[in-house]
Amino acid sequence: MYYDIFNGDADGICALIQLRLAEPRKASLITGIKRDIQLLTKINAQPGDQLTVLDISMQKNSLQLNQFLANGASVFYADHHQAGDLPLHPNLTALIDTSSDTCTSLIINKYLENQFPLWAITAAFGDNFHLSAEHLANTINLDTQNLQLLNNLGTYVNYNAYGSCLEDLHFMPDKLYREMAEYISPLDFIASSSAIYQQLENGYLEDMHSAEQVQPEYVTDNVAVFILPDQAWARRVSGVFSNNLANQYPDRAHAVVTYTPANDYQVSVRAPLNNKVKADELCASFATGGGRRAAAGINHLPPTGLTEFIAKLSQTYP
């Protein structure tokens, strides 16, 4: 049996689109909201099964990964998050790059020798790797208008993945993947699926307008913390609002805090764009935290832990 297991954000979706355009295959789709990263717990791989795993931390899925490999499954794994110790197993192909200027779709683009660079550019914009996206665009002489369309699409698809549950989202990630995977080019998707694109754009603009009215809870020259209200729009916009703040204030670290149905906090952290380090270390110091050096998060922070978090944020980026 084939499984395609991928993060429900722009990077995970666009990475899988590239692979399936190059290597068509019918597979069971396993995905979820952006923070739902322990996706290997959702299956029980058997001997002979083939798994493609994209844009989720190997470290967070190591128990299941080792179990599946021991059971006789084969795994192709590509990612840019914390990996931990890579298993040495003949049935594992691992493309792991935790550099602060790459994402899973760029890794797949390199693996496929630049077959579908427009999808990789879209994903890089979604993950807030604007310089990397523009660098790749320059190699194929992409014009300014189409570059902006890919920037918008990546941002909107990434925005769609955020929420505390699937009901918060405009589109289920597996449905959005199926819609987008029908097209060789993301520009064709935009032109042919205007209703989907328009719904994502309208939702993004409306939610961002609401977020921009929120004043920081804590702010210095080096860090800022925003607490968004307990509403669905706030959960949807947390990641893209964090990216927007990082782009506006490239020398400042940011944390966007939202409420969860579990009566605690979810935290999105962005390192300064001019110093893209330590976000993963900061978040990993909390029980449900992790991510990458430039951008990371905490899934469940007790309200009593907010003061400690702000103190650690300030210490990390003095």
Image (cartoon, grey):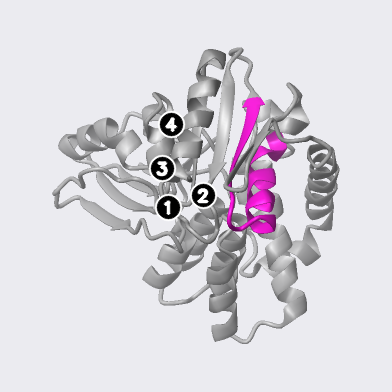
Asked whether 245 falls inside the magenta stretch, the response is: yes
Disc 4 residue type (three-letter)? Gly
Disc 2 residue type (three-letter)? Ala
Q: Earlier in the sequence, mark 4 or mark 1?
A: 1
Asked whether 44 falls inside the magenta stretch, the response is: no
Position of 254 relative to 180 (above/below): above
Tell me: 136 left or right of 50: right
| Span of residues in magenta | 236-258
Query: What distance separates the C-alpha of mark 1 from that of mark 2?
Result: 6 Å
Task: Please give the label number shown on residue 289.
Answer: 4
The residue at the point 41 percent across, 27 percent down is: 286
Task: Please give the label number shown on residue 310.
Answer: none
The residue at the point 25 percent across, 56 percent down is: 93
Q: In the image, residue 272 lies at what x, y percent? A: 54, 53
Q: Earlier in the sequence, mark 3 or mark 2?
A: 2
Query: What distance separates the C-alpha of mark 4 from that of mark 1?
Result: 15 Å
Q: Which residue is mark 2?
A: 271
